[in-house]
Image (cartoon, grey):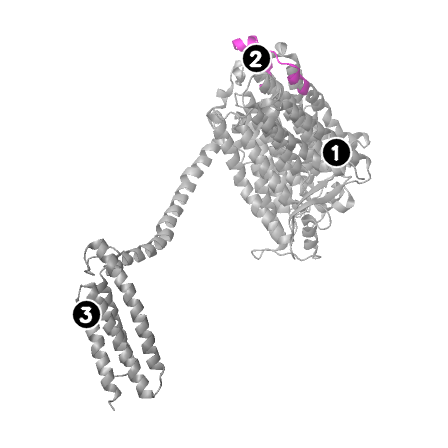
Amino acid sequence: MIPTQWYLLLSAGVFCIGLFGILTRKNALIFLMSVELMLNAANINLVAFSQQWGNLNGQVFALFTMALAAAEVAVGLGIILVLYRNFEDIDVTSPTTMRW
Amino acid sequence: MTGAFDLVPAIAVLPLVSFVIALFAGKYMPKKGALAGIAATAGSLLLSLWVALTVATGDHAGYNETLYTFVEGAGTFSLELGVLIDPLSSLMLVIVSLISLLVHVFSLGYMNDEGETGLPRYYAGLGLFTFSMLAFVFASNILMAFMFFELVGLCSYLLIGFWFRDEGPPSAAKKAFLVTRFGDYFFLVGVVGIFATFGTGTFAGAESFPHLAEQALHGEHEVTTFFSLGEQAWFTVLGLLVLGGVIGKSAQFPLHTWLPDAMEGPTPVSALIHAATMVAAGVFLVARMYGFYLLSPTALGVIALVGGFTALFAATMAVVRQELKQVLAYSTISQYGYMMLALGGGGYVAAVFHLTTHAVFKALLFLGAGSVIIAMHHNENMWDMGGLKERMPVTYWTFLSGSLALAGIFPFAGFWSKDEVLYETLVHALGTGGIQGPLLLLGYAMGLLAVFFTGFYTFRMVFLTFHGEPRSDVAEDPDPVRWNVKGPLAVLGVLAATVGFINMAPVKEILDVDVAYLHQWLDKAPEAYLTSVDHYHHLLETGAFAGYHAEELSPLLPGLVSLAIALAGVGLAYRLYNVPEPVEHTDRLGRAKTILMHNYYQDEYQVWLATGVTLPIAKAADTFDQGIVDGVVNGISSVSRFSGRGLRRLQTGVVSNYAALLTVGLVLLIAAFGLLGGWF
């Protein structure tokens, strides 16, 4: 059996890839994908701990998270569509009017 | 004993109704509201007479009831409106409603016939004025008295400034209001102090504050005193605080400066203010709570000194005036000084007597002056008059009656009352030891000296106005006046000659017949009210209280002395001014003339106090308020505004930056937890 630490390392790696994407890319679709990666990193954590403790709660939560991620993607795509309509672009740095 | 007493509130409400009618319907009425006012004040007079008659015929009849409690006190005092009818207030009700009625009638001639505009406002003002004064007179507690005292001040402001389009009247009205308000601040503090000390403000009865104070001095009652003063000292402080309002309203030194300026108002209003309402309110208040003042010899001494000084001081200023109404204004100040002197000198009956006679003869003199002013086309300068005696006989003879009363010539009203004022002061001055005796003697001396000036300026006025040759074209052919001017003059002219007979104290002494009717009348107050002359006399002679003693002295000699002095004044005026072509003799006074013409620079120093002292202090306070107090508040807000302006730069609107900030924040948080939690 693979020790839990490995899962956690994998999860941390995936999370960091997602974080890196969010911090460095401008394309909104890449943003969405990066968020997806971070969510899945969390799922890996949940499942890994679930396996470690022999408790199914974590797996159930992982399923919930996936459903939530699907809903989030729907909302995110909607936002990206509106973004495109208004700016003819899906660069996240271009809409900067929502400030002070 | 119901009936008359139940209708007492109506005495005040009737003029209030006329106020409302004149204000809202006056312009549609034939005489612009005058008829409503006349009807209302006539009704008040009838009711007052009925009340007085009930008091006179009843055996110690009185009425002391609460009408309306507007603040119910739970475990403490309540604030109430009430009615107190005793001989003093019923007498005053008659005086006020009588003078007010005559003034209303006179106004028909002075205002309506002269084609003045704004008459509904005028009659509304008169109605409200009468209402306030009547309600003040029968007030059963000091708070109610204060409320109506203030209302009286407001009405005088409205009426003095009646001709608000001219330059003088509005400024005179403001001055009258501000100067009397200055005194009223002290009065208000005194009212609060009385409530805080005694838990009640009622004037009469066993639970009244004068009686509680009396018991407190006997050690039978506990009161709260403040500033760790002894009881008597604290009562003196309270009495002097209330006296502040009295000095303002009754135009006593040093708050008398508003009164001569108040001559800017219509003459009937001056008559009302000087004879029966505004100015009388102050002296009446002292008489109302005389039982309280009698407990404090210091307060009495102050009253006597202020009164005596004012009597002399104002009389000297009246000597050089050139306008008819100005002479009368200063004589009012002087005469109210006499009343204060009497109150301070232990002559309660004398003060009320002089208040009564003065109300009659001063109303007469002002209305007579009004008649002359109508005839002279509103020229008030006496040097433009002369020779009016033949041309306006009714006015002349009635005015002469009032002048003889004012000068104190036997047997006119003023002789009896002024003589009694001086006599009471003298006997108490001679009988009392310690510091009070000489103080009262000083007051008496000043009062006696003022008698000379009174006789002089009164007859200087009469001779200049009515005798000699006419000194202007208008005086050659004055406008005639109608019945509505002559009627009130005739009534008051007869009264001025006869009203003195209500209390001929010297005759009582000489012939041993009891003709001191006013004394008997004021003594008819119900025992339980503790406002009778007998009770006051008891307080006056108790050593722990006022501690005055009356010397045995025949009133004949002092009476003759003051009569002789008055006649000397009249004689001098006769010699100097009763000539066909009188000239000003004031230049003989030398530098004194300048000082007198400038009223001893009273106005100047008060203006200096306002602009030279109060204004800089106010400015300094303003600087402190704006600079330091507001500065701290503004500083705090500026700091947060500046920091907010800087911090809002964080909100770039770029999502990536927010994400970066979130990440950095999370990392820092974890690092902090790690460091503090000892993970490393």
Closer to the camera: disc 2 or disc 3?
3
Report the residue at 60% width, 14% height from top: B466
Element marked by disc 1 = loop
Q: Chain of mark 1?
A: B
Of labels 3 and 1, the one closer to you: 3
Amino acid type of the residue tagged 2 in the rendering: Gly
Asked whether B499 falls inside the magenta stretch, the response is: no
The answer as to whether the residues below labels 1 and 2 share one chain is yes
Q: Using the numbered discs, state the Cα–Cα distance from disc 1 to disc 2 in whole angstroms.
A: 42 Å
Task: Specify the quadrant that holds the C terminus of chain B.
Answer: bottom left
Q: Amino acid at mark 3?
A: Gly
- Residues at badges 2 and 3 in contact (C-beta under 8 Å)? no
Q: Earlier in the sequence, mark 1 or mark 2?
A: 2
Q: Residues within 10 Å of mark 1 (few under 14, many from 20)?
A: few
Residue B658 screen position, x and y as percent: 24, 64
In the image, residue B597 lies at what x, y percent? 48, 26
Specify start and end residues of the magenta stretch as a single range: B461-488
Q: Is residue B476 above or below residue B48?
A: above
* Image quadrant assignment for residue B483: top right
Residue beneath label 2, please?
A: B386
Q: Quadrant of residue B100?
A: top right
Label 1 belongs to which residue?
B554
Residue B62 in picture, x, y percent from top left: 76, 41
Structural distance between the alpha carbons of marks 3 and 1: 120 Å
Measured Cα–Cα span from mark 2 to mark 3:
113 Å
Comparing B244 with B171, the one in front is: B171
Of residues A6 and B30, the one drawn nearer to the viewer in this rendering: A6
The residue at the point 24 percent across, 84 percent down is A7
Q: Which mark is residue A21?
A: 3
Write down the chain letter for disc 3: A
Q: Quadrant of residue B113?
A: top right
